[in-house]
Image: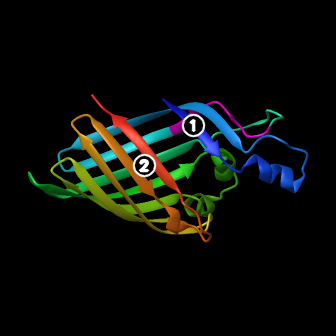
Amino acid sequence: AKFIYSFLCPEWALKAVNIGLTQGGRGTAAAIDLGLFYDYDFFKYGIALQNIGSTIKYTESGEGDPLPRALRMGFSIIPIRNEYYSLLLTTEFVKVIIGLIDEMREGEYRYIWNDTWKGIGFEVNFFRLFAVRGGYFWDTDGKREGYTWGASVGYRTLRIDVGVDSDIYSFKTTNYRIAVNYSW
């Protein structure tokens, strides 16, 4: 389960463009993710359906937009693992599924692949406490491509993670994903 807070633009920008809105640019929503995970020693496979939930409302009119429901699939292998460090190699495919049935009916299979986000990466974990990672992301139709990186720190069942994908855009941005994970 998750709470989503999205900040698209400040209210002063809405007033400056003079489109009749005086409030907006921020939205909140609630959603859940469902998934299956297979773990066999050094090989892992996962599939998840994400963002099943409410619409997100950005404007004062209260008109909602659907959350980007997505199907995610990925697998990883751990070729090196000992008591000091481990190396994880991974790949992931993400397809936003809003409108997917219409695309399939029209035979747009090439579009489906081009519109699928693809990523490969690695993670080095030290003493199961601290991890650093890097990767490469590409989305042909969205014209996003580039390197990503991140780090996490954790102990036993609690982990704090920061991911950065600012370099995949053709414009300057600072995208951070901060997550706190607890597993039992």
Which residue is at a point 29% across and 54% down the rendered structure image?
76
Determine whether, in the image, residue 138 is placed left or right of residue 124.
Answer: right
The picture places residue 140, in percent across and down from the top left corner, at 58, 67
Please say whether residue 11 is one of the residues in the magenta stretch.
no
The C terminus lies in quadrant: top left
Instruction: Judge depth for marks 2 and 1 and give the one in front.
Output: 1
Determine whether, in the image, residue 63 is placed left or right of residue 163.
Answer: right
Residue on which disc 1 sits: 4
The total of numbered circles placed on residues is 2
**Rendered view: 30 above or below 134:** above
**Contact, mark 2 vs mark 1 (Cβ under 8 Å):** no
Residue 86 occupies which quadrant of the picture? bottom left
Element under disc 1: strand
Return the residue nearer the eye: 79 or 133.
133
Residue 131 occupies which quadrant of the picture? bottom left
Residue on which disc 2 sits: 73
Predominant secondary structure, magenta span: strand
The picture places residue 159, in percent across and down from the top left corner, at 31, 41
Return the residue nearer the eye: 150 or 12.
12
Identified by mark 2, the residue type is Met
Determine whether, in the image, residue 92 is placed left or right of residue 53.
Answer: left
Element under disc 2: strand
Marks 2 and 1, the one that precedes in the sequence: 1
Identified by mark 1, the residue type is Ile
